[in-house]
Image (tube, coloured by chain):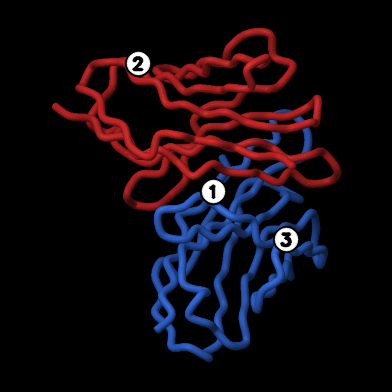
Amino acid sequence: AQKITQTQPGMFVQEKEAVTLDCTYDTSDPSYGLFWYKQPSSGEMIFLIYQGSYDQQNATEGRYSLNFQKARKSANLVISASQLGDSAMYFCAMRGPSGGYNKLIFGAGTRLAVHP
Amino acid sequence: SQTIHQWPATLVQPVGSPLSLECTVEGTSNPNLYWYRQAAGRGLQLLFYSVGIGQISSEVPQNLSASRPQDRQFILSSKKLLLSDSGFYLCAWGTSGGTDTQYFGPGTRLTVL
């Protein structure tokens, strides 16, 4: 069965520093996608970044990058130059097996606090 | 650009009362639509998904149901709410192919008393 594990319930970082949020996954499907979402206190889930299992390079989107290590089944999110507005819950998710729809399986999340 | 709406934003309902949450999407055609529930401090759990009008699949047995009367409208319902139905309900849309990214609405916070 597919599974996403986020082992850090909470992290804190100083403003302007970089931070890495961990995510490991388990799947037997050779084709899969990995996502990171941000959930601020308002509750909306905001899509941040995507990594496909066949992508040769690590995904980047502005200050977000995904450290994809396929052999270790990890997909860590790196946020560079942290800002106060980055304080939120962060969820790692994996697209489920293909077959007409795309179920997302979510980890438990990591709460990030950015300190001034 | 695409926009997804959910209402109401918050809802307090007594046990045993009915429920109707609505989700609508603008700016896209024939989207895949999803209902997720998030318990306090937890990740999201998929409840229902739909690949077209009238096509609903359930992921978890419960006293909730979903309907898709129009291409871009997705409704979550219950005839009689339970205390355990409390939570944050999120609707999402996506398309098949490409990255299959799902985009979420603002959510509805439901409290059953």
Q: Colour of chain A?
A: red
Q: Where B79 sits versus B56, above or below?
A: below
Which residue is tagged 2?
A80
Residue where numbered disc 1 is placed: B104
Say the numbered circle drawn on residue A15: none
Q: Nearer the viewer, mark 3 or mark 1?
A: 3
Q: Is residue B110 left or right of residue B92?
A: left
**Disc 1 on helix, strand or loop?**
strand
Task: Please provide percent x and percent y for residue A39.
Answer: 41, 44
**Element on which disc 2 rests:** loop
**What is the crowding at mark 3: few (fewer than 14 residues within 10 Å), some, or many (at least 20)?**
some
Amino acid marked by disc 1: Phe
Of the image marks 3 and 1, the number of the one nearer the N terminus = 3
- Which label sits in the foreground, 2 or 1? 2
Instruction: Please indicate whether residue A64 sits to the left or right of residue B70 in the image.
Output: left
Q: Which residue position is annotated with label 3?
A: B59
Return the x and y of residue B41 as percentages of the image width and height.
40, 54
The colour of chain B is blue
